[in-house]
Image (cartoon, coloured by chain):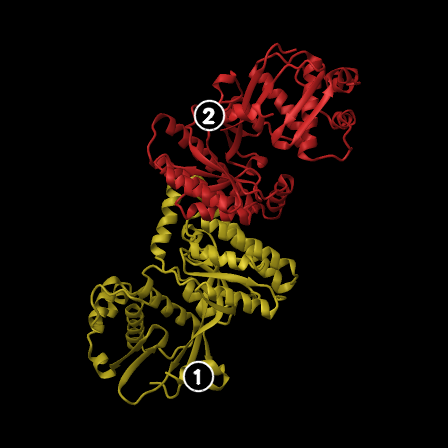
Chain colours: A yellow, B red
Amino acid sequence: MLSEVLLVSAPGKVILHGEHAVVHGKAALAVALNLRTFLRLQPRSNGKVSLNLPNTGIKQAWDVARLQLLDTSFLDKYREEKPEQGDIPAPTAEQVEKLKEVAGFPVDCATTEHLAVLAFLYLYLSICRKQRWTGEDLELINRWAFQGERVIHGNPSGVDNAVSTWGGALRYQQGKISPLKRPPPLKILLTNTKVPRSTKALVAGVRSRLTKFPEIVAPLLTSIDAISVECERVLGEMATDPVPEQYLVLEELIDMNQHHLNALGVGHASLDRLCQVTTARGLHSKLTGAGGGGCGITLLKPDLERLEVEATKQALTDCGFDCWETNIGAPGVSTHSAASLDTHVQQALDGL
Amino acid sequence: MLSEVLLVSAPGKVILHGEHAVVHGKAALAVALNLRTFLRLQPRSNGKVSLNLPNTGIKQAWDVARLQLLDTSFLDKYREEKPEQGDIPAPTAEQVEKLKEVAGFPVDCATTEHLAVLAFLYLYLSICRKQRWTGEDLELINRWAFQGERVIHGNPSGVDNAVSTWGGALRYQQGKISPLKRPPPLKILLTNTKVPRSTKALVAGVRSRLTKFPEIVAPLLTSIDAISVECERVLGEMATDPVPEQYLVLEELIDMNQHHLNALGVGHASLDRLCQVTTARGLHSKLTGAGGGGCGITLLKPDLERLEVEATKQALTDCGFDCWETNIGAPGVSTHSAASLDTHVQQALDGL
């Protein structure tokens, strides 16, 4: 039981370069954004565990006593099977099915809301069972976060939880994650086109294009890989010896990768529109993540006038997009004292 | 002296795939269009050589007697230097300078109109000197056409004159030109954005991007090369075993190459517009040639309704573009009897 309020936050992330190519063994660069998710853990005396996720519209509570009475022995399955590994167990498909029973969810539930609750319950029940939840080791947090990802995504790369845990910027390739040294805190716009897409279908589309035209698509993936490598090199240079020309290179890399992603077939008219709007203002954008809609990032050079940034955000909002100004290379999972929080974060938490 | 009227025509051409990549040793596919240039050679009794190029606004005449008196010995220079070669001499920079003197043009003249007249005078004077102008050998026509190209372009690849001489479709790679067997007469729209551009600057831009980012751009050129190869393969299949799916592949190749050309930096907002307009109608377009404006091609599937074609042409015309419906794989240089010509061609010639 917590004796006092615990406030923690973790950054959001975007893929800077390498989405899709990463599925085929190429490098990807993931960067932490200072758009953070805050978590307030607060002791209660009402005998309930309450989960309140305002952004996904979830407000649920369970009797602690009832949860303790539940048969959660199925959570030990993996551990029993591979006792020598000593690592955090991965949720199996059967465990997730059992969890749906426990939560009283229908078997075929797959909405964000259902999955978020399942991930919470899995982590809550597993961590409580193991009496480990006081640990502050980042490594441990990362491994548990990865299991949460597994509940939600099925087959996550591990890069999302890693960048949210450690912050900064990470290079990911073939399962190997390596942090970039001192990534510069580049200002960007993160724009959500709000066009829904299926990551699975987009990844499958790229795979099928690769199978259909191997001689055309394989060198394209090689080219995307080289963009990630070049971007990592430039970000490294910017940390030690920043010059304005580096921004021009970053812009060229963004443009080339956006065209490459279009050539892979993961573009979308909404993303074209995003690029068109920002190009008209001399700014450079690319989709980030799966494409086919979803989000795009726009690089903001440090000398860009405030009015120009505001006008761009307005132009994107006028397209029906959501737009946030943020920066990359944000700190990883962090604890906060209530007093140190931004007023708007405090207000949001107090309003819960 | 001709005893009667000689009517000849030669096709226009577009690059189907491989522009820019061809400069770096990759394959390109050039195809003849049935948009033809007609030439009427007509005997006159007024002692003048008259040149009338209505499309470029040129109408000039020279006294035959005066031309014969000109010191054109400079035209023999190359021949004297390399007598063993027996090939058609290439115009040297000095010869072109001398020719400007003969034509009374300023030294720095470089407009299309000036260059067209210089190319005509060079070919007229050279061919007359060699008494070869009655020859009907395609090889000879091609070689002379290449010299005309040299006057105008400086360093032509030879593919333009070759495809206009032989028609059909040609593969060009590292100076080697090979005709495609029976290319299918695909219907296309040829659209001129009317945005002027400098081929030289665009080619230099690609070279500089290749030098700056070799690891990114070299695989991109490899991918473009594979698109040309795949297109050639599909065109070959269409000749022997045509199925509707081949059009889908041609469309995918067009899309991928257009994105690749954008990634090389030779796109333009006008070409984006062209693609956007045709994409909205389910059609696929790419730039053709140097890019940065200029022309684009749009594939028209055989089952496309007439009304839909007309609506697309109208939509492109509404953008301020010129648009022609034509087909690829047209016949090469041809002689015609006046009676066999289309009414509109006859009328155009009669109006001169």
Q: Is residue B136 left or right of residue A124?
A: right
Disc 1: CA contacts within 10 A as few (<14), some (14-19) or many (>=20): few
Question: At label 2, which amino acid type do we have?
Answer: Leu
Q: Quadrant of residue B243?
A: top left
Disc 2 to disc 1, how far (Cα)? 71 Å
The one nearer the camera, A274 or A6, is A274
Which residue has dot 2 on it?
B180
Q: Residue at x 37, y 88 (%)?
A: A3
Residue B6 can be seen in this image = yes
Secondary element at image label 1: helix
Which residue has dot 1 on it?
A347
Question: At label 1, which amino acid type do we have?
Answer: Gln
Q: Quadrant of residue B187?
A: top left
Secondary element at image label 2: loop
The one nearer the camera, B171 or B348, is B348
The one nearer the camera, B192 or B174, is B192
Q: Is residue A281 left or right of residue B95?
A: left
Disc 2: CA contacts within 10 A as few (<14), some (14-19) or many (>=20): some
Residue B140 horizontal/vertical position (percent): 60, 17
Is B190 located above or below residue A7 in the figure?
A: above
Residue A223 horizontal/vertical position (percent): 51, 47
Q: Please tell me how many numbered marks the rendered image carries.
A: 2
The chain under label 2 reads B
Q: Residue at x 39, y 81 (%)?
A: A40
Q: Residue at x 49, y 46 (%)?
A: B318
Say which quadrant the C terminus of chain A sits in: bottom left
Residue B284 can be seen in this image = no
Residue A172 horizontal/vertical position (percent): 46, 58
The chain under label 1 reads A
Q: Residue at x 64, y 63 (%)?
A: A242
Confirm whether circles 2 and 1 share one chain.
no
